Each structure stands twice: as C-alpha cells, then as structure tokens.
Amino acid sequence: QVQLAESGGGLVQAGGSLRLSCVASGSIFRINAMGWYRQAPGKQRELVAVITRGGRPDYADSVKGRFTISRDNAKNTVYLQMNSLKPEDTGVYYCHAEFPLLPIRDSWGQGTQVTVSS
C-alpha cells in the first residue's frame, strides 16, 4: 500500500511564502511524475505544478514565476515553494504521484489547506 502525506500548509498574508512537502511511503518501486493540484471552494481541482522523474517542471500560468516545484527521488519527496502568495492561491493543495509498476498506477494525498489573507 502506498501513502502520500502532505505538510506545510497554513495561513499567510498576501505577499508571504509557504513551502509544501509531500512524502510517499509504502511499497514503492518507482515514482514517475509528481505534482501539486489545488481546489478552491466551489471550484474544480486544478493543476498547479508537475515535475518529471528527471526533474523537468511545468507550471500553471497563474503561478509561473512565483512557485517552484522540486523533488528528491532518494527521499520519495516532492516540494512546492510558494512565494508572493495571493488571496486567489487559497485552497486545499493535493499531492499526486504516478506509480507505473503498481496496480494502483497513481495516488493522491489527503490535502493540506493554504489560506492567503489580503
């Protein structure tokens, strides 16, 4: 069984920073892409950033230049450094990972709340 555990969310003022972490644990043989998604109240879940196993990142236009995704393959961990936060960044942030050698194929974390006050 595989689990993803996020941490690092919280309440911050506009212009502030937060760093999210997500650790994968369990019977992991290989992790391909890892990413962060978010869901604001009343809205659909959307992609924030994704990073390949080789370290190539991709970002939603709304966070380019402010957020940085990175990963440590040895620790099965993905990070999201969020700078210059805006109230519209508020939402529940979910970690996602692809497990190509497992029957489940992919998994989601339980989510961590990020609230940016104006």
Image (spheres, rainbow, N blue to C red):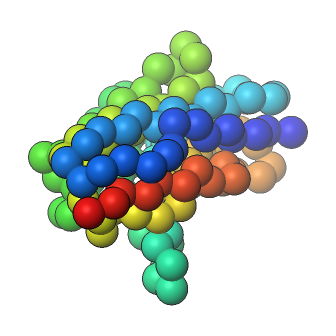
The reply to whether residue 24 is in sight is yes
- The answer to which image quadrant residue 27 occupies is top right
Front-lying residue, 9 or 28 = 9
- Report the front residue among 34 and 104: 34
Q: x and y percent of residue 53 in the render?
A: 44, 32
Q: Is residue 107 left or right of residue 112?
A: right
Task: Work out whether 81 lies above or below 65.
Answer: above
Camera-side residue: 45 or 14? 14
Position of the C terminus by quadrant? bottom left
Residue depicted at x 58% and y 50%: 112
**In the figure, is residue 20 to the left or right of 51?**
right
Q: In the image as oriented, which residue stretches furthest toward the top?
A: 74
In the rendered image, the quadrant that contains the N terminus is: top right
The x, y position of residue 12, in whole percent, is: 37, 47
Residue at position x 58%, y 17% in the image: 75
Q: Quadrant of residue 52?
A: top left
Task: Farthest residue to the left: give it.
Answer: 65
Q: Is residue 106 visible?
A: no
